[in-house]
Image (cartoon, rainbow, N blue to C red):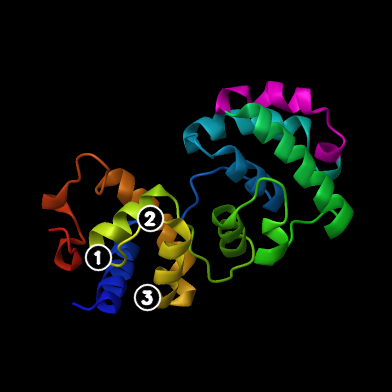
C-alpha cells in the first residue's frame, strides 16, 4: 500500500469501530480551551475530575481574567505544573477579553498567540469548535502514525504536515479523536495488541 492508501484504510477502519469524541469534558469553547491546556502532562481523566469545580467557580473569560492566580492554582493543583497552568489560564483569558471580545478565536495565528497555547491545542479548537480541517498531534497520533508508516518522525509539527497530505480534510479532526481511543484500546505504547488490530492489514510495523 502507498501511504495515502494506508491512511484511507485507517480512516475507514477506525470510523467503523470508534466514535469521534473528545475525551475532555467541556460545555463551551472556552472550557475546552482551558481543559486542553490543563491536559499537558496530565491524563484527561484527571482533568475531568478537576474542571467541574473550576468551571463552577469561573464561568466566563471575564471571570477568569479577573481571578487571583493563587485561587486558580488551588483548584487545579492535582493536574501538575499547576502554577504555570494557572498563570496561563488567567493571562489567556485576559488576552481573549482584550483582543477577541471575550470569545475564543478561530485562526491558528490568533490561537497560538494566547499564553500557553500551541498548535496541538489550537488544532483541537479549530477542529472541534469551528469544524475546520485539523490534525491534533498528541502522543497517540504520533505513535500510531509512525507504526502505520504514515510518517517517520516524532516531531509534532512534522507529523501534522505529513498527515495533512494524507488524511481527507473533512476526516482529519475526527480521525485524531479515533486514534486516541485506538491507541488506548489496541495500539498502546508498550504492549500493542497486534493480533486483534483492525489496522493490521495496512500497518508497516506488522
Is residue 20 shown to the viewer in this render?
A: no
Residue 90: numbered disc: none
| Residue carrying label 1 | 149
Ranked by sequence position, the earlier of labels 2 and 3 is 2
Query: Magenta region: which residues?
Result: 63-80
> Where's residue 128, x and y in %?
58, 60
| Residue carrying label 3 | 166
Residue under the image location 59 percent in, 29 percent down: 81
Mark 3 is surrounded, within 10 Å at the Cα level, by few (under 14), some (14 to 19) or many (20 or more) other residues, namely: some
User: Tag 3, which secondary structure?
Assistant: helix
> Where's residue 200, x and y in %?
16, 61
Q: Is residue 189 magenta?
A: no
The C terminus - image quarter: bottom left
Q: CA distance from mark 3 to mark 1?
A: 12 Å
Mark 2 is surrounded, within 10 Å at the Cα level, by few (under 14), some (14 to 19) or many (20 or more) other residues, namely: many
- Discs 3, 1 touching: Cβ within 8 Å: no
Compared to residue 162, the image places residue 63 above or below, namely: above
Residue in the foreground of this view, choosing between 100 and 25: 100
User: Tag 2, which secondary structure?
Assistant: helix
Ranked by sequence position, the earlier of labels 1 and 2 is 2
Magenta stretch: helix, strand or loop mostly? helix
Horizontally, residue 127 falls left or right of residue 181, namely right
> Where's residue 118, x and y in %?
60, 53
| Residue carrying label 2 | 141
Residue under the image location 24 percent in, 47 percent down: 186
Residue under the image location 55 percent in, 34 percent down: 47
The N terminus - image quarter: bottom left
Residue under the image location 24 percent in, 62 percent down: 148
> Where's residue 17, x and y in %?
30, 58
Is residue 70 shown to the viewer in this render?
A: yes
Amino acid at each position: 500500500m502507498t501511504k495515502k492508501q494506508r491512511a484511507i484504510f485507517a480512516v475507514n477502519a477506525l470510523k467503523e469501530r470508534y466514535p469521534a469524541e473528545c475525551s475532555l469534558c467541556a460545555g463551551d469553547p472556552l472550557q475546552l480551551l482551558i481543559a486542553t491546556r490543563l491536559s499537558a502532562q496530565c491524563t484527561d481523566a484527571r482533568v475531568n475530575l478537576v474542571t467541574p469545580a473550576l468551571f463552577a467557580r469561573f464561568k466566563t473569560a471575564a471571570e477568569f481574567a479577573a481571578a487571583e492566580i493563587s485561587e486558580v492554582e488551588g483548584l487545579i493543583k492535582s493536574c501538575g505544573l499547576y502554577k504555570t497552568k494557572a498563570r496561563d489560564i488567567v493571562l489567556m483569558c485576559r488576552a481573549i477579553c482584550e483582543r477577541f471580545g471575550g470569545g475564543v478565536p478561530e485562526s491558528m495565528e490568533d490561537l497560538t498567540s494566547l499564553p500557553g497555547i500551541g498548535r496541538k491545542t489550537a488544532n483541537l479548537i479549530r477542529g472541534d469548535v469551528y469544524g475546520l480541517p485539523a490534525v491534533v498531534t498528541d502522543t497517540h497520533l504520533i505513535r500510531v502514525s509512525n507504526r502505520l508508516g504514515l510518517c517517520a518522525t516524532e516531531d509534532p509539527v512534522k507529523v501534522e504536515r505529513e498527515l495533512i497530505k494524507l488524511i481527507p480534510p473533512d476526516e482529519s479532526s475526527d480521525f485524531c479523536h479515533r486514534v486516541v481511543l485506538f491507541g488506548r484500546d489496541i495500539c498502546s505504547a508498550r504492549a500493542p495488541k497486534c493480533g486483534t488490530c483492525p489496522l493490521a492489514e495496512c500497518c508497516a510495523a506488522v
